C-alpha cells in the first residue's frame, strides 16, 4: 500500500507519505478498501499505456533512422560518389558491363531462341487431302509472318521417313494412322489427330461393283509406292483377295488418278481423303463415275482396329442433284500431325492453334469440337500439345503476335533473374558502399603517410617546398570528395592529420631557413 500511495503522491516526503498511507489504508479498510483498489488499478493502466507508447515511439524512431541511412547510401550511390573514376577504371567498368550484357544475350539466345521464319511441312501429291489442308495451314502461318513451305511427297509413308532423316529439313508432316508408330519412328512426336480420313473406291458408271472380288483383273489406281494410299490398298484389298497378282496396281493418285479414270487408263481408283479434297470432289460430282459402298465394312473394322466405319448419307454432297444417290458405307482411319522433337516451341504453339482453327469445326463425319484432340495410340503426344488441349493457349499466345512473344519471354526471364539476384544483393549494398568509402579514406591516409616519411630525414628547402605543395594537393582533392554523414568523424580526423603534417612541414621549412641563414 505504501508504494502505490507514494506513486500517487510523488511530491510527498517519506514520513508524510508513510503517515498518509497509513491513514488512507485505515480509512480504505474501514470503508471496505474498494476506492483505493480502483485508484491503484487506474494508475497501473496509465503507467502501462505510457510505457507502451514510449516503446512504440522508440521503435519507430529506430526504424526511421535506418530508413534515412539506407536512403542516404542509395542517394550517394546515385550521385556517383562511390569513387573517383579515371579513364582506366571507366574502361574496366565499361568492359565488365558490355561483357555481362553479351553473356546475358548469348544465354537468352541459347535458352530462349527466336522461332525460325521458315518451316517445311510434308504433305502429299496434288489433289490429296494433305495438300488441301496444307494450303490452309500455309495461309494461317503467313499471318504470323512465318513461311510454311509445303513439300510435295508420295504420301504418309515417305513423310515419316523424312521426319526421321536428319539430313532432310522437313519438321512437320501429315500422316495417316496405321503407317508406323513411336517404336519404329524415334524422335517423332504427335500433336494429336485432326480429322477422319475415309477410303473411297470410284469406278466408271458403265459398270456395277458391290463386292471386292469384282475388282480382280481390273486396273486399279492405288497411288505411288511410299504413299499411305498404296499401303492401305495392299492391306485392305489384299484381305478381299485383290492384290498385285490378281489385279494391276497403278501408281496414279489424286488429280492424276482422276484424269486416268476419265481417259480410260484405269478401271477403278482407290483414294484416301476428306470429301472437300479436290480429287474426291471431282470424282463425286462426275456423272460418269460411281462410288462403291464398301462391302462388309464392319468386318474390316474388326480385322483392322485402326479403321473405323463411316456412313455418307444420301444427298450430303449435293442435295439438289442427290449426290450420293443412296447411303454409302465406308471405312477409314484418322489423320494426324507429326513433328520432330526439336521443333521450336513457338512454332509448335502456332501449329496447334492452326490445327484448332482449321479442324475445330464440324465435318460430314464428325461434330464440331471433336477435333483436334490428343488421342493418339501410335505415337507419343508432345507435352505442349497435352497442355494445349487441357488448358488452351496461354495468355501471351492469345494476345501477343509470334514476333513479340519471344522478346516478352526474354524480358520476363531477365526481370526474374534480376530480381532473384538483385534482392539478396541489396542487403550488401550499404556494406559494400561503406567498404569502398573506407577504402578511399585509407588511400589518402596511405598518401599522407608516404608523404610524411619522404621528408622525415630530409632538410632540403626545395624538397620541403615540393612536399608542401603536395600536401595542399591532397587537401584540395579531399575537399572535392563527397562523404556521407556517418563518415564525418573519419573525414575530420583525416583533415586534422593533414593539418598536423602541414605544420610539421612548415616547422621544417623554418628550421631549414635558419640553417641556410
Image (spheres, rainbow, N blue to C red):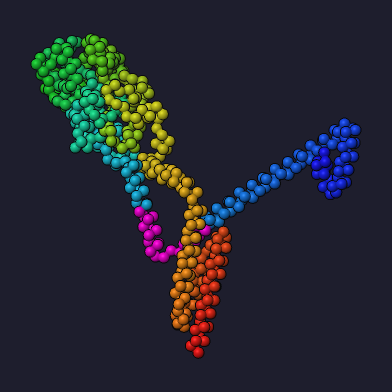
Question: Which quadrant does the N terminus fall into?
Answer: top right
Q: Which residues are magenta?
A: 76-99
Residue 220 in sight from this viewpoint: yes
Q: Residue at x 53, y 79 (%)?
A: 507
67 and 440: which one is in front? 440
Q: Residue at x 24, y 29 (%)?
A: 186
Rendering coords of residue 389 (x, y %)? 37, 27
Q: Residue at x 88, y 46 (%)?
A: 16
Magenta segment, prevailing SS (helix, strand or loop): helix
Residue 411 in sight from this viewpoint: no
Figure quadrant of residue 183: top left
- Determine whether, in the image, residue 504 is placed left or right of residue 101: right
Rendering coords of residue 58 (x, y %)? 66, 48
In the rendered view, would you say 115 is above or below 302?
A: below
Rendering coords of residue 263 (x, y %)? 13, 23
33 and 399: which one is in front? 33
In the rendered view, would you say 227 is above or below 120?
A: above
Q: Residue at x 19, y 20 (%)?
A: 232
In the rendered view, would you say 474 is above or below 177?
A: below
Most extreme residue toward the bottom, as rendered? 517
Rendering coords of residue 236 (x, y %)? 19, 16
Amino acid at each position: 500500500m505504501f508504494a502505490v500511495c507514494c506513486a500517487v503522491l510523488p511530491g510527498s516526503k517519506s514520513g508524510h507519505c508513510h503517515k498518509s498511507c497509513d491513514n488512507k489504508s485505515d480509512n480504505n479498510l474501514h470503508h471496505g478498501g474498494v476506492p483505493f483498489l480502483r485508484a491503484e488499478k487506474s494508475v497501473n493502466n496509465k503507467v502501462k499505456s505510457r510505457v507502451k507508447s514510449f516503446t512504440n515511439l522508440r521503435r519507430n524512431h529506430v526504424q526511421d533512422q535506418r530508413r534515412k541511412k539506407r536512403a542516404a547510401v542509395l542517394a550517394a550511390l546515385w550521385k556517383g560518389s562511390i569513387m573517383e573514376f579515371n579513364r582506366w577504371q571507366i574502361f574496366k567498368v565499361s568492359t565488365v558491363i558490355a561483357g555481362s550484357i553479351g553473356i546475358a544475350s548469348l544465354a537468352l539466345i541459347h535458352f530462349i531462341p527466336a522461332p525460325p521464319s521458315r518451316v517445311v511441312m510434308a504433305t502429299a501429291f496434288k489433289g490429296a487431302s494433305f495438300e488441301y489442308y496444307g494450303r490452309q495451314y500455309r495461309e494461317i502461318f503467313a499471318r504470323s509472318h512465318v513461311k510454311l513451305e509445303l513439300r510435295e511427297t508420295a504420301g504418309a509413308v515417305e513423310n515419316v521417313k523424312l521426319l526421321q532423316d536428319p539430313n532432310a529439313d522437313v519438321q512437320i508432316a501429315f500422316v495417316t494412322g496405321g503407317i508406323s508408330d513411336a517404336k519404329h519412328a524415334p524422335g517423332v512426336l504427335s500433336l494429336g489427330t485432326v480429322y477422319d480420313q475415309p477410303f473411297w473406291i470410284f469406278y466408271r458408271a458403265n459398270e456395277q461393283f458391290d463386292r471386292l472380288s469384282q475388282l480382280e483383273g481390273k486396273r486399279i489406281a492405288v497411288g505411288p509406292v511410299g504413299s499411305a494410299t498404296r499401303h492401305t490398298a495392299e492391306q485392305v484389298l489384299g484381305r478381299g483377295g485383290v492384290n498385285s497378282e490378281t489385279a494391276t496396281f497403278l501408281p496414279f493418285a489424286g488429280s492424276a488418278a482422276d484424269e486416268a479414270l476419265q481417259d480410260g487408263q484405269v478401271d477403278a481408283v482407290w483414294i484416301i481423303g476428306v470429301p472437300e479434297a479436290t480429287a474426291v470432289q471431282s470424282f463425286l460430282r462426275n456423272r460418269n463415275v460411281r462410288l462403291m459402298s464398301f462391302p462388309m465394312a464392319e468386318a474390316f473394322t474388326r480385322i483392322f482396329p485402326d479403321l473405323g466405319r463411316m456412313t455418307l448419307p444420301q444427298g450430303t454432297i449435293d442435295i439438289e442433284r442427290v449426290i450420293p444417290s443412296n447411303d454409302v458405307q465406308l471405312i477409314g482411319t484418322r489423320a494426324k500431325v507429326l513433328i520432330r522433337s526439336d521443333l521450336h516451341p513457338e512454332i509448335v504453339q502456332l501449329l496447334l492453334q492452326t490445327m484448332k482453327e482449321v479442324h475445330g469445326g464440324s465435318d460430314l463425319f464428325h461434330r464440331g469440337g471433336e477435333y483436334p484432340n490428343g488421342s493418339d495410340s501410335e505415337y507419343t503426344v508432345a507435352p505442349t500439345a497435352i497442355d494445349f488441349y487441357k488448358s488452351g493457349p496461354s495468355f501471351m499466345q492469345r494476345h501477343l503476335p509470334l514476333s513479340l512473344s519471344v522478346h516478352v519471354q526474354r524480358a520476363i526471364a531477365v526481370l526474374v533473374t534480376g530480381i532473384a539476384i538483385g534482392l539478396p544483393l541489396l542487403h550488401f549494398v550499404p556494406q559494400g558502399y561503406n567498404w569502398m568509402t573506407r577504402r578511399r579514406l585509407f588511400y589518402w591516409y596511405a598518401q599522407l603517410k608516404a608523404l610524411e616519411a619522404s621528408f622525415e630525414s630530409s632538410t632540403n628547402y626545395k624538397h620541403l617546398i615540393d612536399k608542401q605543395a603536395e600536401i595542399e594537393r591532397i587537401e584540395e582533392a579531399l575537399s572535392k570528395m563527397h562523404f556521407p554523414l556517418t563518415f564525418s568523424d573519419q573525414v575530420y580526423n583525416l583533415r586534422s592529420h593533414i593539418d598536423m603534417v602541414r605544420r610539421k612541414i612548415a616547422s621544417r621549412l623554418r628550421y631549414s631557413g635558419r640553417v641556410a641563414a
